[in-house]
């Protein structure tokens, strides 16, 4: 049924990408809030929430950029942006994780595990998003 209607297939891919991007952003926001909550020993939740959103703003920017380039079908630019930025984020997170265990920072091991969880979320969702981009390229050709 989807093969006979390429517009339906494209809109289904577009909707699934938007849903995946929203889900990824919400998961990362929740993980960042949990990390801030464990790292900062302040009882003021508004300060913790503000710090979470400051750390979350690059991810929010990338989510908007991903949706913009996907909707306007600039796939080569989008693929390059996702690969470069997400690999950079993943490498930095893994290096921070290794650095924490090298210097035996036991107080922050839970937070480092949360950062590793954020890395897993990045890997999972961005692999799916890149697969959707490749599917979209195949349907447009």
Image (tube, grey):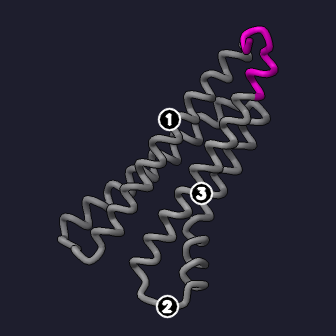
Residue neighbourhood size for the residue with mark 2, other residues' Cα within 10 Å, grouped as few (<14), some (14–19), many (≥20)? few
Q: Quadrant of residue 112?
A: bottom left
Above or below residue 64? Residue 77 is above
Q: Nearer the viewer, mark 2 or mark 1?
A: 2
Mark toward the start of the polypeptide (3 vs 2): 3
Q: CA distance from mark 1 to mark 3?
A: 17 Å
Residue neighbourhood size for the residue with mark 3, other residues' Cα within 10 Å, grouped as few (<14), some (14–19), many (≥20)? some
Mark toward the start of the polypeptide (1 vs 3): 3
- Residue picked out by circle 2: 43
Report the side of 98 relative to 79 (left or right).
left
Q: Say which residue appears at 54% left-offset and 90% top-offset.
A: 44
Above or below residue 52? Residue 3 is above
Report the side of 53 relative to 3 (left or right).
left
- Residue picked out by circle 1: 127
- Residue picked out by circle 3: 26
Q: Residue furthest front?
A: 1
Report the side of 134 relative to 116 (left or right).
right
Q: Secondary structure at mark 2?
A: loop
Q: Quadrant of residue 13?
A: top right
In front here: 106 or 57?
Answer: 106
Q: CA distance from mark 3 to mark 2?
A: 23 Å
Is residue 116 magenta-colored? Answer: no
Q: Say which residue appears at 78% left-offset and 15% top-offset.
A: 6
Q: Secondary structure at mark 1?
A: helix
Q: Quadrant of the N terminus?
A: top right
Where residue 5 sits: x, y (%)?
80, 13
Above or below residue 137? Residue 126 is below
Magenta residues, start to end: 1-11
In front here: 75 or 13?
Answer: 13
Q: Quadrant of the C terminus?
A: top right
Q: Say which residue appears at 50% left-offset and 47% top-offset.
A: 86
């Amino acid at each position: 049924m989807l093969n006979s209607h390429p517009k339906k297939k494209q809109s289904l891919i577009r909707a699934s990408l938007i849903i995946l991007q929203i889900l990824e952003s919400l998961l990362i926001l929740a993980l960042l809030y949990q990390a801030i909550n464990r790292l900062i020993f302040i009882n003021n939740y508004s300060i913790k929430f503000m710090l979470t959103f400051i750390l979350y703003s690059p991810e929010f920017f990338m989510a908007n950029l991903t949706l913009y380039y996907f909707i306007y079908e600039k796939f080569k630019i989008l693929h390059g942006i996702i690969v470069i930025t997400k690999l950079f984020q993943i490498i930095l997170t893994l290096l921070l994780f290794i650095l924490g265990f090298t210097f035996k920072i036991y107080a922050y091991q839970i937070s480092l595990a949360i950062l590793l969880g954020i890395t897993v979320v990045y890997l999972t969702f961005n692999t799916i998003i890149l697969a959707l981009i490749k599917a979209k390229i195949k349907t447009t050709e």
